[in-house]
């Protein structure tokens, strides 16, 4: 009996058994995180104010903002006032010139590197699907001071715009901004301070506004939402009337609707992440699981080398490096999607007090050290693959704790940002 227990103790203390045990723990932890995310998929997501159901059959109205600091206002345009703009050929046109046919309007500026080209391409592709509809398209710059006729002509040429059907317009800045703010009531403003970065001189929404042949505004649609664009297509083709959820608020109901919006905004903050497509919403959890997996692989690799299992150590560390590379790709894709679909650079941390100080302390150290990991890891791995053991060990003593810290804090940051 004593020999039996001694043999079991010897087996359990063996390096291979320890690595196997850690691997089992790693599998269980990752499985539990995966299950949590799968169950979370069945939860009802927080909806944006314009989609939140208040009463059976009632929805909050569409809203817009005049600046980054203003409260959302009910979107209630009626008819477009008279205006004079200049198209890409240098010809002036007015509201009267557009009457007689339905038209759709969107807003861009030429220096915009991402959002505006995306919406312009969408307009070009959308035009092909409604080529049988006798209509006009108008793209108006929110930067009329710099977007001259020549610039708008070049921009129109990129998207193969026929001026007989698709106008790219600029004009007097005062008149253009009056049309934006008072006519179409578009969420748009000029950025200032630190928010004013190259290519981000202006902020504006991605919406397309539908105007009928008499100049009356009928509806508003998100140009990057395929479902909404499908609805607009059916409306333009005459298959359906404009659904209520896309219509502007009638003037008589404005005050009551505005009170409802403001009261609701006090209770529920619009979550920019709700604007992301499903695949992008899953990326933060994916990133956390990749960080967790990298952490466990690093710990297994450390255990393996301590047990002098060199071949196993090599495989585990290469796996850890591969997982970290996948994390970096996923992280960049997520933040690109966040800007493209939600117009934000990242999810803000909304907690206050001590926890906020703790969060930013972890975040700052994580970001600084994370920038060092790719270089340190590549140098250390290269030294090992070349069997330069002495140099490899020296680099590893620096790389390993930094790499491990970055992987662990990546999971902690996810938990604090998305789960608290």
Image (cartoon, rainbow, N blue to C red):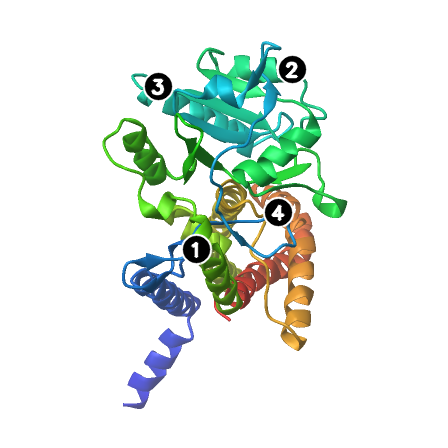
Number of on-image labels: 4
Q: Which residue lies most toward the right here? A: 193
In primary-sequence order, the first of circles 1 and 3 is 3
Residue ID for mark 3: 128
Image coordinates of residue 50 in percent, x first then y, are 42, 54
> What whole-number distance in Å separates the C-alpha atoms at marks 4 and 1?
20 Å
Question: Is residue 239 rendered to the left or right of residue 358?
Answer: left
Are the residues tagged 1 and 3 within 8 Å (C-beta)?
no
> What whole-number distance in Å separates the C-alpha atoms at marks 1 and 3?
37 Å
Residue ID for mark 1: 253
In primary-sequence order, the first of circles 4 and 2 is 4
Image coordinates of residue 130 in percent, x first then y, are 32, 22
Label 3 packing within 10 angstroms: few (<14), some (14-19), many (20+) = few
What is the quadrant of residue 215 in the picture? top left
> What whole-number distance in Å separates the C-alpha atoms at marks 4 and 3?
33 Å
What number is the disc on residue 149?
A: 2
Q: Which of marks 1 and 2 is in front?
A: 1
Q: Nearer the viewer, mark 4 or mark 3?
A: 4
Residue ID for mark 4: 66
Q: Is mark 4 on a helix, strand or loop?
A: loop
Are the residues tagged 1 and 2 within 8 Å (C-beta)?
no
Label 4 packing within 10 angstroms: few (<14), some (14-19), many (20+) = some
Q: Is mark 2 on a helix, strand or loop?
A: helix
């Amino acid at each position: 009996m004593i020999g039996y227990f001694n043999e079991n103790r010897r087996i359990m203390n063996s390096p291979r058994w320890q690595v196997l045990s850690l691997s089992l723990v790693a599998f269980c932890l990752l499985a539990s995180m995966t299950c949590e995310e799968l169950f979370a998929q069945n939860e009802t997501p927080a909806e944006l104010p314009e989609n939140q159901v208040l009463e059976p059959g009632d929805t909050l109205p569409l809203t817009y903002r005049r600046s980054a600091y203003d409260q959302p206002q009910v979107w209630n345009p009626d008819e477009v006032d008279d205006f004079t703009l200049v198209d890409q050929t240098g010809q002036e046109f007015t509201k009267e010139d557009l009457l007689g046919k339905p038209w759709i309007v969107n807003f861009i500026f030429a220096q915009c590197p991402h959002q505006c080209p995306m919406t312009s391409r969408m307009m070009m592709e959308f035009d092909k699907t409604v080529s049988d509809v006798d209509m006009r398209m108008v793209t108006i710059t929110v930067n009329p001071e710099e977007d001259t006729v020549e610039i708008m002509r070049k921009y129109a040429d990129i998207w193969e715009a026929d001026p007989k059907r698709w106008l790219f317009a600029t004009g007097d800045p005062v008149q253009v901004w009056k049309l934006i703010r008072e006519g179409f009531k578009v969420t748009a403003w000029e950025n200032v301070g630190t928010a004013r970065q190259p290519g981000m001189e202006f902020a504006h929404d991605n919406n397309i506004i539908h105007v009928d042949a008499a100049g009356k505004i009928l509806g508003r649609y998100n140009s990057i939402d395929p479902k909404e664009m499908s609805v607009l297509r059916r409306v333009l083709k005459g298959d359906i009337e404009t659904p209520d959820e896309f219509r502007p608020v009638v003037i008589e109901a404005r005050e009551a609707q505005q009170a409802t919006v403001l009261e609701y905004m006090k209770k529920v903050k619009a979550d920019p992440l709700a604007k992301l497509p499903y695949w992008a919403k899953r990326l933060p959890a994916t990133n956390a699981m990749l960080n967790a997996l990298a952490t466990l692989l690093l710990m297994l690799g450390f255990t393996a080398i301590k047990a002098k299992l060199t071949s196993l150590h090599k495989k585990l560390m290469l796996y850890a490096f591969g997982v970290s590379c996948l994390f970096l790709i996923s992280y960049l894709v997520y933040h690109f999607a966040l800007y493209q679909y939600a117009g934000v650079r990242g999810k803000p941390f909304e907690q206050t007090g001590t926890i906020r100080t703790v969060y930013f302390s972890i975040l700052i150290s994580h970001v600084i050290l994370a920038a060092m990991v790719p270089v340190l890891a590549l140098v250390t791995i290269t030294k090992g693959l070349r069997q330069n053991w002495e140099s490899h060990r020296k680099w590893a003593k620096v790389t390993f704790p930094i790499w491990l810290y970055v992987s662990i804090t990546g999971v902690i940051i996810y938990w604090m940002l998305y789960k608290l």
